[in-house]
Amino acid sequence: MDPGTSEQDEEKKKYVSVCVGREEDIRKSERMTAVVHDREVVIFYNKGEYHAMDIRCYHSGGPLHLGEIEDFNGLSCIVCPWHKYKITLATGEGLYQSINPKDPSAKPKWCSKGVKQRIHTVTVHNGNIYVTLSKDPFKCDSDYYATGEFKVIQSSS
């Protein structure tokens, strides 16, 4: 840390928007990866909307940028390529199918495990895509894989 910079200033810097690319590039590829203040994120373009989340799956650190986007129960989800965990793009909730084993005629229904994957804010300005890291104070399962040895993108710094 710079001797003239306080811890509070360093903390504020984490929440400054970072330009990660151009709108036309992500619209073609429908996804991109970036390092935002030393945190790896994946940005998706799906159904005309942008979504950003931690790049590693909350369950076991799978590479979400390699997963497929599918709809479950009307919600767009990224499906982790390792164990097929389903994570909503909009909220970061983990989804699973539930059934009542005591009811032989019961049909499986989609349920939420709650927010498991940290979601970040995406904004567009003059054709540039910006990501702002989440300020949500709660501990998210994906936080475990967002640092240290689990990093997949090499930072230029």
Image (cartoon, rainbow, N blue to C red):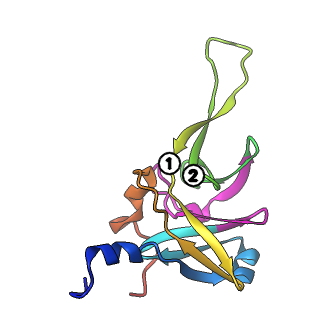
Question: Number of marks in the image?
Answer: 2
In depth, the one of 73 and 8 nearer the eye is: 8
State the quadrant of the N terminus. Answer: bottom left
Q: In the image, residue 53 lies at what x, y percent?
A: 55, 62
Name which residue type carries label 1.
Lys
Q: Is residue 85 above or below residue 153?
A: above
Q: Residue at x 46, y 62 (%)?
A: 135
Q: Is residue 89 above or below residue 127?
A: above
- Asked if the residues shown at circle 1 and circle 2 are in contact, with their CB atoms under 8 angstroms apart, the answer is yes
Residue 138 is left or right of residue 1, and the answer is right
Residue 91 is left or right of residue 48, and the answer is left
- The residue that disc 2 covers is 92
Q: Which residue is at the far left?
A: 3
Instruction: Specify few, some or many for label 1: CA neighbours under 10 Å numbering under 14, 14-19, or 20 or more.
Output: many
Q: In the image, residue 48 lies at what x, y percent?
A: 78, 66
Q: Residue at x 39, y 51 (%)?
A: 139
Q: Is residue 96 above or below residue 151?
A: above
Q: Residue at x 59, y 77 (%)?
A: 130
User: Which disc number belongs to residue 116?
Assistant: 1
Residue span colored magenta: 44-71
Q: In the image, residue 45 lies at what x, y percent?
A: 71, 68
Q: In the image, residue 43 lies at what x, y percent?
A: 61, 69
Q: Earlier in the sequence, mark 1 or mark 2?
A: 2
Name which residue type carries label 2.
Gly
